[in-house]
Image (tube, helix red, strand yellow):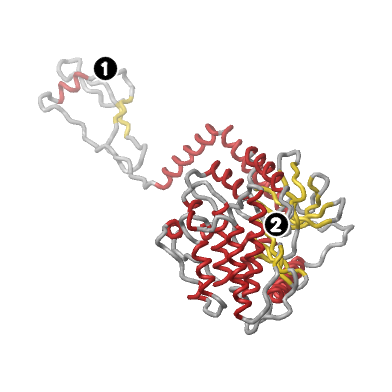
Amino acid sequence: MTEIDKQSAQKQADPLIGQTVAGCYSIIDILGTGGMAIVYKAKQLHTDRIVAMKTLKSKDETVMKRFLREMQMLSKLKHQNIIEAIDCIETPDGQTFFAMEYVDGITLHEMVKTLGSVQKEDDIAAIILQICDALEHAHRQQIIHRDLKPGNVVLVEKHGSIQVKVLDFGIAKIQDDLQKLTTQGEALGSPLYMSPEQCMGQDLTPASDIYSLAVLAYELITGRVPYQCPTVYKLMEAHCTPSIHPDPISTHRPDLACVAQLDQIMMRALETELDKRFNTAAEFKKAIMAWHQATRVAQGRPLEQYSAGGKSEPDKQPESGKGKDLSESMTDLLALRHKKLQSQTSFMRQDAGPAAPPSEKRPGPSMTILIARIAGCFLVVLIGAFCILFFDNIKSAWVSASEQVSSLLSPKSPAPQAPETAPVQSPETPPATQEAKKPPQAPGNLNVEKSAPTGEPGLQIVQPNYPQQSTSGPNNARRLTR
């Protein structure tokens, strides 16, 4: 996803766009976001002036109050090379906004990334000297920038020349306080441009800003930073070790006039030890001006008359063999950026389809999806409540069903039958004795005895049982007829 795509997504998701802050500023768009703040494009309602409004992402009350105090202090910085502070307001919900001057330009980071190093000596001197003017004014007010880097320097094309605007004075101090609330023992800032004392967590002085400016100037001239290390630790070690020095400017830009003199200036500004470094912005500015005048003498051009904010008069005798002016390149770069933004906006509009009339509200699918989700959640809750209420019944039914299924699935084995045994008669007892033991039966009764199985179930043989008469004696004759 490109930077334009990210900003477009943020614009669609930010609820502040289209809202009015404190009844004074109407939020139009997002200009950019950082690790700790968001910058909006807004309009001051009572003047119709376009401004930039910055607010912190953190909602911590202590940090917000510190932000308010710092912004009120920074509003005293009035300089043509410093972004003007306009207003600082606090909303009823505790959010603080800092309104400042809006400029339509490009950052030094964007310019170096797109165009590479600055080619002409005049352009190099113009940018560095204006940054020195901004730092000198702030240092007089006892304000140290603390986070000077190409992203905090904006270049504006004005009447054929370059005007520099430095922003975010004092913001790093607020960011430092925010860092202490979250992570202890870590250095804060942009490691590529941090001074040695900032890397070691020591107190900062105006010389710390001079070191950061020297790193920025080195990148401006050569197109690369002085130290390129694989890790942040190695990078900070290079900043803090006196025996480690960057490559001379002449190694990367031998085409520059009086490059040996420029090497001496840059090596002194990049000294690790404070007593060997330029102590003030005025000292560094004086050295750069001397080099610039020397280049003009070497090229046979008249000396430059300086004033705060850049050249006093446009140079009518351009440098030879250095290509187009930086102001022309900036104009082309701005036109290219605006064209990309317009094409991106046009693509988003085409992708969104034709706009609905103002009087009609096009129904979106979001309401249908919301209703479906609510219904699904309600159904899940209903099922859960039913299971809780009838847990015992469901459990017993489940166990019973499981037993029935198990009995149906298990194989049936035939029931064992008892073996048939014939009646056992004692051999010691004679048959006559066995008959004598039978109880007497009345005449005419039938004696029913079970016979052996005949193959037909339930079939039995019935035999009559008559009383027996003794055969001894005269009265014991056998009856032959019934």
Q: Residue furthest right?
A: 359
**Amino acid under label 1?**
Pro
Direction from residue 37 to residue 430 in the image, left or right: left
Q: Secondary structure at mark 2?
A: loop
**Which residue corresponds to mark 2?**
82
Q: Residue furthest left?
A: 428
Q: Position of residue 186 (x, y in %)?
A: 48, 48
Q: Position of residue 75 (x, y in %)?
A: 73, 48
Residue 22 or residue 83, whichever sits in front: 83
Looking at the rendered image, the quarter that the C terminus falls into is: top left
Residue 243 appears in the figure: yes
Residue 343 appears in the figure: no
- Closest to the camera, between mark 1 and mark 2, is 2
Quadrant assignment, res 28: bottom right
> Dot 1: within a 10 Å radius of its alpha carbon, few (fewer than 14), some, or many (20 or more) residues?
few
Direction from residue 245 to residue 142 in the image, left or right: right
**Which residue corresponds to mark 1?**
440
136 over 4 or under it: above or below? above
Q: Residue furthest bottom?
A: 321
Q: Residue at x 60, y 69 (%)?
A: 290
